[in-house]
Amino acid sequence: MAQVFSRRLSLLLRVLGLGAVAIIAAAAVAYRVTARTDAALLAPIEQPIPFSHKHHVGDDGIDCRYCHASVEVSAVAGIPPLSTCMTCHSQLFTDASVLAPVVDAYRTGRALRWNRVHALPDFVYFDHSIHIGKGVACVTCPGRVDRMPSTWRVVSLDMQWCLECHRAPDRYLRPRERVFDMDWQPQGDQLALGKELRERYHIRSTRELTDCSTCHR
């Protein structure tokens, strides 16, 4: 059977086909790396009870660490046990229907299952304690939760977003004693303060902070 296309044309078609596949693959990788999941941002996550950080933190002034007790010493912020909730709600709003799931779960020993707001892939390692210990504030990642009647995600949490901080940590650092202060603002030059804190807290070099093994272990 005679060849339909010449060898030169066949070679050209193969090259074009491989090029198209390469472009599609590169676009998919670029999307996965750089795409910001804006659809998931600013959308409150439904929970078994409508817990309000605005009420507990913003209005009542409860410190983050009262509920998230392990945040300074653990890789995870931690979900407070129901006994923490009942410390107050065994005395306050005891008959409120909205709190019935909490009371029932506490009395029966049944777990109250919260829906995760800030979720990272399993292949990403993140440690709350090291960030807090180095002067990265609570407000940097979750945002102003003290103003949220229901909690939502305000940042993408994609790799490029994390690298923005790891490449220039001086822009985000604050004194450790101000990490939990949601209203704190630097007095003066943030970059100068960040450089000073970076040396004081022995923060690793930018090259080390952006090494793959820092977050992918």
Image: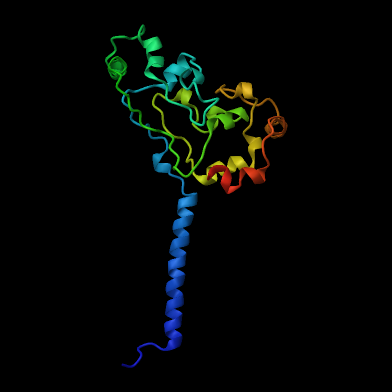
Task: Pinpoint residue 134: horizontal percent, then vertical percent.
Answer: 63, 30
Which of the image's four quarters has the N terminus?
A: bottom left
Tell me where residue 196 sits by quadrant: top right
Q: Which residue is most to the bottom?
A: 2
Residue 148 or 79: which is nearer the viewer?
79
* On screen, residue 36 above or below 175: below
Name which residue lies at 44% across and 21% down: 54
Task: Pinpoint residue 21: horizontal percent, then vertical percent.
Answer: 43, 67
Name which residue lies at 39% across and 42% down: 39
* On screen, residue 107 above or below 74: above
Tell me where residue 84 sits by quadrant: top left
Residue 115 or 208: which is nearer the viewer?
208
Tell me where residue 169 sits by quadrant: top right
Name which residue lies at 45% across and 40% down: 120
**In the image, 193: left or right of 33?**
right
Q: How is the image coloured?
A: rainbow
* On screen, residue 2 above or below 121: below
Residue 24 or 147: which is nearer the viewer?
24
Task: Pinpoint residue 36: horizontal percent, then vertical percent.
Answer: 46, 45
